[in-house]
Amino acid sequence: MTSLKTTTSRTRKLAVKEASDIGIPVSEKIRARLKKAKKRFHANDNIAEFIEPGEIEAIFAEVQEKMKGVLESLVIDTQSDHNTQDTAKRVAKMFVKEVFAGRYTEMPPLTDFPNISHLNELMVVGPISVRSACSHHLCPIMGRVWIGVLPNKNSNLIGLSKYARISEWIMNRPQIQEEAVIQLADILEKSMKPLGLAVVMDADHMCMQWRGIKDPGAKMVNSVMRGVFLKDSDLRKEFLSLLGSRYNQSN
């Protein structure tokens, strides 16, 4: 049984800690936890386990305040211009709670179930619409993902909607397309343990269409192949053929 003296001591330590934290931005507190744990916090990393209850709102408030400073440095009047009076708040909400939410929220549950029917035929899921942002310029990436799975009798299977949910979670953070498909493949491979896995992404990059070269036709297509997809050329051709038919239907 905890003594009154021990409880009082803990309360005092907590009060001292809370007092010492006053004035420290929440981003610095989270960054300190990450560094202490020697965890990476790159743009496309998930840091949800290092965020304590209530801190998402504090991040939102901090980003909003700093976004006001960005607008001021751009010499944009946020006082008398009714169009920009709430822009800092809108942008903060967009970054923290929408387009970058995959950094700050835990992975959605991938409820799996056993392969009772011993399915061992190729499954193709897609196109799954995805939205992200280039981590170089924070410009939108809009695209589609196709996933090919060759299960075995011991593979775990997941519900169809879970492919879309996990894809959205991965993409809702600043990304590089080449790394995004690898992250998606890693999670699906770990969860399902299939004989083979293939992920293809086709996307428009606003960092090439809106700025820079300003080429409206610029796209990027890349893929990740795992397991038997790397060794079996016929399986790879079958997947790409099925993908091609779905691709044409969606255009």
Image (cartoon, rainbow, N blue to C red):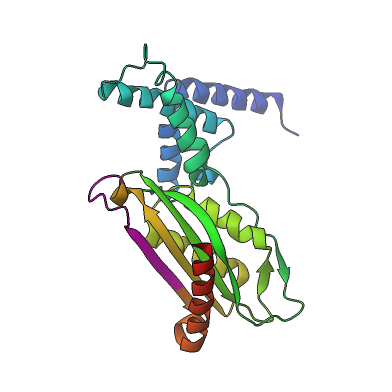
Q: In which quarter of the image is residue 150?
A: bottom right
* Residue depicted at 45% across the width and 22% down the height: 20
* Residue depicted at 67% across the width and 70% down the height: 157
* Residue 219 at x, y percent in the picture: 35, 59
In the displayed structure, would residue 248 be above or below residue 69? below
- In terms of secondary structure, what is the magenta stretch mainly? loop
Q: Give the position of the N terminus as an image quadrant.
A: top right
In the displayed structure, would residue 22 be above or below residue 120? above
Query: Which of the pair 46/174 is nearer the observer?
Result: 174
* Residue 18 at x, y percent in the picture: 52, 23
- Verify whether residue 214 appears in magenta: yes
* Residue depicted at 42% across the width and 70% down the height: 223
Left or right, residue 154 beside residue 149: right
Q: Quadrant of residue 105?
A: top right
Q: Residue furthest left?
A: 213
Query: Which of the pair 55/5 is nearer the observer?
Result: 55
In the displayed structure, would residue 6 be above or below residue 235? above
Can residue 186 be spotted in the picture? no
* Residue depicted at 76% across the width and 79% down the height: 117
Query: Which of the pair 153/36 is nearer the observer?
Result: 153
In the displayed structure, would residue 9 be above or below residue 98? above
* Residue 98 at x, y percent in the picture: 51, 39
Count numbered badges in the picture. Answer: 0
Can residue 194 be spotted in the picture? yes
Per the rendered image, the range of residues in magenta is 210-224
* Residue 169 at x, y percent in the picture: 54, 51
- Verify whether residue 169 appears in magenta: no
Left or right, residue 9 beside residue 61: right
